Image (cartoon, rainbow, N blue to C red):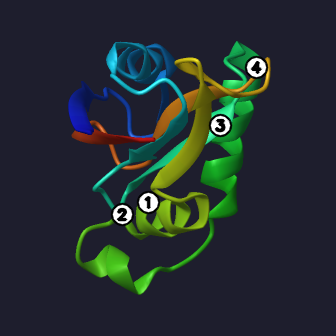
Amino acid sequence: MIYQFNISTKERYQLVDITDKIEDLVLKSEINNGSVFVFLPHSTAAIILTENERGLKKDWLDFAKKLVSGFNFEHDLIDNNADSHILSGLLGQGKTLPFKNKKILRGTWQQIFLFELDGPKNRTVIIQINQ
């Protein structure tokens, strides 16, 4: 089964917790045990697993900005968003997680985030649930 939903971001770099939406889709699916694939059809955003803690989220944002600072990217002559493409490629646009008895198997502190790297934008999140 394939589902999708949209997220509107407000900042150039932003973390949006999408865990509840994905868990809800798994819960409502007809599949009890399997895997859920979370995918962004965007080359300037990413999916990460991390703790939903204010300080750590700020650390992620600061680290991402610092990682790509100081470069003269060729692509910036076109769109001024080469940093976003590079970070998206490094972090990845998709993650697969197992679930059992309709519950995603993840660590206590692992939340699923859309990592906006070129906002504000309207983003589509595609979810595929497999047995």
Residue at which label 3 appears: 49
Mark 4, other Cα within 10 Å: few <14 / some 14–19 / many ≥20: few
**Distance from the alpha carbon under mark 2 to that under mark 4:** 26 Å
**Distance from the alpha carbon under mark 3 to that under mark 1:** 18 Å
Q: Classify mark 1: helix, strand or loop.
A: helix
Q: What's the mark number on residue 81?
A: 2
Q: Is residue 19 visible?
A: yes
Front label number (3 vs 1): 3
**Distance from the alpha carbon under mark 1 to that under mark 2:** 5 Å
Q: Amino acid at mark 1?
A: Ser
Front label number (2 vs 3): 3
- Identity of the residue drawn at 50% across and 80% down: 72
Marks 3 and 4 in Cβ contact (< 8 Å): no
Q: Quadrant of residue 48?
A: top right
Q: Classify mark 3: helix, strand or loop.
A: strand
Q: Is residue 121 visible?
A: no
Mark 2, other Cα within 10 Å: few <14 / some 14–19 / many ≥20: some
Q: What's the mark number on residue 84?
A: 1
Marks 1 and 2 in Cβ contact (< 8 Å): yes
Among the two numbered marks 4 and 1 on one chain, the one whose residue lies closer to the N terminus: 4
